[in-house]
Image (cartoon, helix red, strand yellow):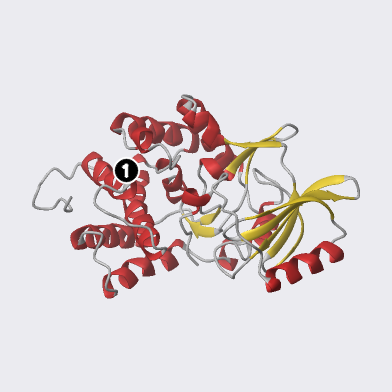
Amino acid sequence: MQPRRQEVTKNARRRECHASTELQKRFDGLTREWRVTVESTCVTDSSLLAFGSRDGQSVVLKVLRNEGDEWRSGAILEAFDGRGMSRVYEHVGGGVLMERLQPGQSLADMALGGRDNEATAILADVIARLCPHASANAWPAVEDWAAGFDRYAAGGDRQIPEDLIEQGHRIYSDLCVSQRHRQLFHGDLHHYNVLFDARRGWLAIDPKGAVGELEYEVGAALRNPYEAPELFLEPSTIERRVDQFGRKLNVNRGRVLAWAFAQAVLAAIWAAEDGTPVDRGHPFISLAHAIWRMLGHKSTENAPSK
């Protein structure tokens, strides 16, 4: 299981594409089984979405194209039982019926509109409210995602500097073996995965589900909104955000930064694997270097290549 580059395709980055026959068949079957009255549909790169109602209640039906990151999202939503997340009504592998959040604007709009301080406070509050019922033993762990470093190193792609891969892998591995207070968390909590609902406030959607320490969860927020690298690459923004998360969540600032560095490298790997050009000016690479400097690695001998 890998939290792919959802921040790149989220929030209206939807192409005109057609649902496959198999996807449409599964969609039609779940629509009938779960008694959904469909009002409108939307085809995305990863899924077929329907907005409608059931028994007078507004719902969203999401049917995934392929098995992957979100295949068990319904079970993960159920584990959180509406605590900080959208509620789930029905789910099977690759299909989920959930409450529709209305009006449903994403937190990215706030950050992109010059209110990043407020957006960060909301993200921290959402993380604090996430409280799963399920045992942490039932879910994938952040250790599983370390395989991305080995996979990239063994492949033929050389877009990302080798020493950056090595440093990211080393720090990620060191953090994995020294974790404390492990728990189930969202796993991909960034601005596009937090929507506003007029009744329940700001809520998370599209969980990947992962087990690890809470410091890990902050990483995705630090490399978003993806359209605004001029915002999230600014050292003062990184520091302010980390301080906000630290105060609200009582997390270790140094470990948050270390996880964010390693995750930025890993996110660059996943972007390359998805076919996205990842040159040395790519935002994830630039973020990794910015955080590396913040971690206090001043020596050019040990600094990853630019």
Q: Which amino acid does label 1 sit on?
A: Gly
Look at the image and tell me whether residue 133 can be seen. Answer: no
**Residue 75 at least partly seen:** yes
Q: Mark 1 points at which residue?
A: 254
The residue positioned 37% from the left and 70% from the top of the image is 147
Name the one closer to the observer, 295 or 287.
287
Classify residue 29 as left or right of residue 268.
right
Q: Where is residue 252 in the image (x, y as percent from the top left)?
A: 38, 42
Q: Residue 46 at x, y = what percent?
A: 58, 61
Relative to residue 123, is residue 156 depicted above or below? below
Could you say where residue 83 lies in the image, as x and y percent from the top left? 67, 45
Q: Say which of 223 and 31 sits in front.
A: 31
Q: Would residue 274 appear left or right of 121 to someone viewing this image?
A: left
Tell which of 139 and 261 is nearer to you.
261
Up-down: is 249 above or below 172? above
Depth check: 171 or 284 in front?
284
| Residue at 33%, 49% in the rendered image | 284
The image quadrant of residue 18 is: bottom right
